[in-house]
């Protein structure tokens, strides 16, 4: 595995405060293009509304709401709206795991069965009979490891995965509509049940996005002796001042939860009109000790910006450290060199690769877009997005709530405008 040497910040850690764009090399006039494009997409009914935050060198140069948060367009989005960040939860779970790693409590190549005994007898799907849904399995050639979970190479896909008929097996085992919340099982019960589902392939064989971070969330619970929600609160949220980030929102915050919309043949509609309401109310549910480390969190643009600014700062913000600089170097190193060469990795595009918990741009992908070499990032199911560009000392958070999204290139267009506004 080749280690990617990223551009690291030097000197004193940068806080996150608002400042004039020109003070950190941005053009105020060019940033106004973001206003126009975001509002245009909202007015045309392509995107509902949301919040965009951009910061460079610890200075917030753009932090605005756009569009609307109701179907009749009577109420605008608010900067303090809370969004279901779904798979952007994975970055937080990754940091939790890396905290345990740097404290010597786990090893990246430890077998998961060391912490969750249900994974000691993992098996791999061999054949499936479509006539009666029966199937055969073979033993895993090697145990699933922490690193394989962090890189989605474990063989544990999502329950809607259509390959190898695993979606049918998930359904037979009562494991559908999982990954955001579960009102029937605790985290421990859910992960122990998941361990009974055969793997889609032999561990480490190739990349397949899935429920890996949910398993890692349970690892955090076992090793720390704390509920995942409490661990995050003590070790990440409270130190960084992330007061609006929760698995289950306190009642006094629930009216700030942004509604989810859908692109339909009849235009933009509230998702509850499309039969999704039971799936979408999970942030308002009662806390029953069920925490999906891969997708269960909700947050604000500012809270999430504080989190990724800490990562950009080599693990520290406002005097509070959540990770060591060397740990972040490990976390942001390319993990897919061999698998990418074999055509089994994250992407067939050279340099568009994967580290521990994030996608990553390496030298081979320079020029694929405006982002610098070393940028790491991810997004969420409900059309949220973030990236961290260490070379430009830049962070970006984009929040909306839209699924399905027929205009997935929206954040790419906004990102281009952000980079085009840099003038130094």
Image: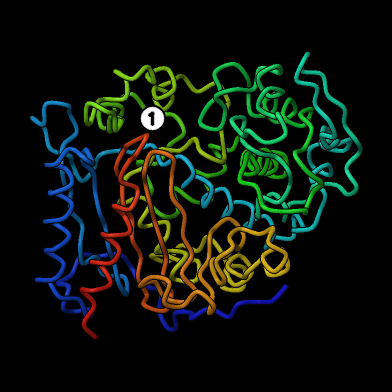
Q: What residue is drawn where x is 77% and y is 54%?
A: 204
- Quadrant in which the C terminus appears: bottom left
Q: Where is residue 146 in the image (x, y as percent from the top left)?
A: 73, 52
Residue shown at 20%/57% (left/top)? Answer: 63
Secondary structure of the residue carrying tag 1 is: loop
Image spot of residue 177 (x, y percent) = 55, 24
Q: Quadrant of residue 61?
A: bottom left
Total tally of numbered discs in the picture:
1
Location of residue 271 with respect to 341 vertically, above or below: above
Drawn side of residue 347 relative to residue 237, left or right: right
In which quadrant is the N terminus drawn? bottom right
Q: Nearer the viewer, residue 126 or 97?
A: 126
Is 375 placed above or below 160 here? below
Query: Where, by quadrant of the figure, is residue 329 drawn?
Result: bottom right
**How far across and how far down the image is residue 125, in percent?**
82, 34
- At a point 66% along the width and 77% down the height, the residue shown is 3
Q: Residue at x 56, y 55 (%)?
A: 95
Give x and y (percent) for residue 2. Answer: 69, 76
Q: Is residue 208 left or right of residue 317?
A: right
Q: Which residue sits furthest bottom?
A: 424
Q: Quadrant of residue 318?
A: bottom left
Q: Can residue 257 be seen in this view?
A: no
- Residue located farthest toward the top when viewing the structure as drawn: 132
Q: How crowded is mark 1: few (under 14 residues within 10 Å), some or many (20 or more)?
A: many
Side (left or right) of 122 relative to 77: right
In the rendered image, is residue 3 in sight? yes
Determine whether 16 is above or below 264 in the image.
Answer: below
* Residue at the spot of label 1: 249
Q: Which residue occupies the foreground of this view, 209 or 307?
A: 209
Please state which of residues 196 and 237 is positioned toward the viewer in this rendering: 196
């Amino acid at each position: 595995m080749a280690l990617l040497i990223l551009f690291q910040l030097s000197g004193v850690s940068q806080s996150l405060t608002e400042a004039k764009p020109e003070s950190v090399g941005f053009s105020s006039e060019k940033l106004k293009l973001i206003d126009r494009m975001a509002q245009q997409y909202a007015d045309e009914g392509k995107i509902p509304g949301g919040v965009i935050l951009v910061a460079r060198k610890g200075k917030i140069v753009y932090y605005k709401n756009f569009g609307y948060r109701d179907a009749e367009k009577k109420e605008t989005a608010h900067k303090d709206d809370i969004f279901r960040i779904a798979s952007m939860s994975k970055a937080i779970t990754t940091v939790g795991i890396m905290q345990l790693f740097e404290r010597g409590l786990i090893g990246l190549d430890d077998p998961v069965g060391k912490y969750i005994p249900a994974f000691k007898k993992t098996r791999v799907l061999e054949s499936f009979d479509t006539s009666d849904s029966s199937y055969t399995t073979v033993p895993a050639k090697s145990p699933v490891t922490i690193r394989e979970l962090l890189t989605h190479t474990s063989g544990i896909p999502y329950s809607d995965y259509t390959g190898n008929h695993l979606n049918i097996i998930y359904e037979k085992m009562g494991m559908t509509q999982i990954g955001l919340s579960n009102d029937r099982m605790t985290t421990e019960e859910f992960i122990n049940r998941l361990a009974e589902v055969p793997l889609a392939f032999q561990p480490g064989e190739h990349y397949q996005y899935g429920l890996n971070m949910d398993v890692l969330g349970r690892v955090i619970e076992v090793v720390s002796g704390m509920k995942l929600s409490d661990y995050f609160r003590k070790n990440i949220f409270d130190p960084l001042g992330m007061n609006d980030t929760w698995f289950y929102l306190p009642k006094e915050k629930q009216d700030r939860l942004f509604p989810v919309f859908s692109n339909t043949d009849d235009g933009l509609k509230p998702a509850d009109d499309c039969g999704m309401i039971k799936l979408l109310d999970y942030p308002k549910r009662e806390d029953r000790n069920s925490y999906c480390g891969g997708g269960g969190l909700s947050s604000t643009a500012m809270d999430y910006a504080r989190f990724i600014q800490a990562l950009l700062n080599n693990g520290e913000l406002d005097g509070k450290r959540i990770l060591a600089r060397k740990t972040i170097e490990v976390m942001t190193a390319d993990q897919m060199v061999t698998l990418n060469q074999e055509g089994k990795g994250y992407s067939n595009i050279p340099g568009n690769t994967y580290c521990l918990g994030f996608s990553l741009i390496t030298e081979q992908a320079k020029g694929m877009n405006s982002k610098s070499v070393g940028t790491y990032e991810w997004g969420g199911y409900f059309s949220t997005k973030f990236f961290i560009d260490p070379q430009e000392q830049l962070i970006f958070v984009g929040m909306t709530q839209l699924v399905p999204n027929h205009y997935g290139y929206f954040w790419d267009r906004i990102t281009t405008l952000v980079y085009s506004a840099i003038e130094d």
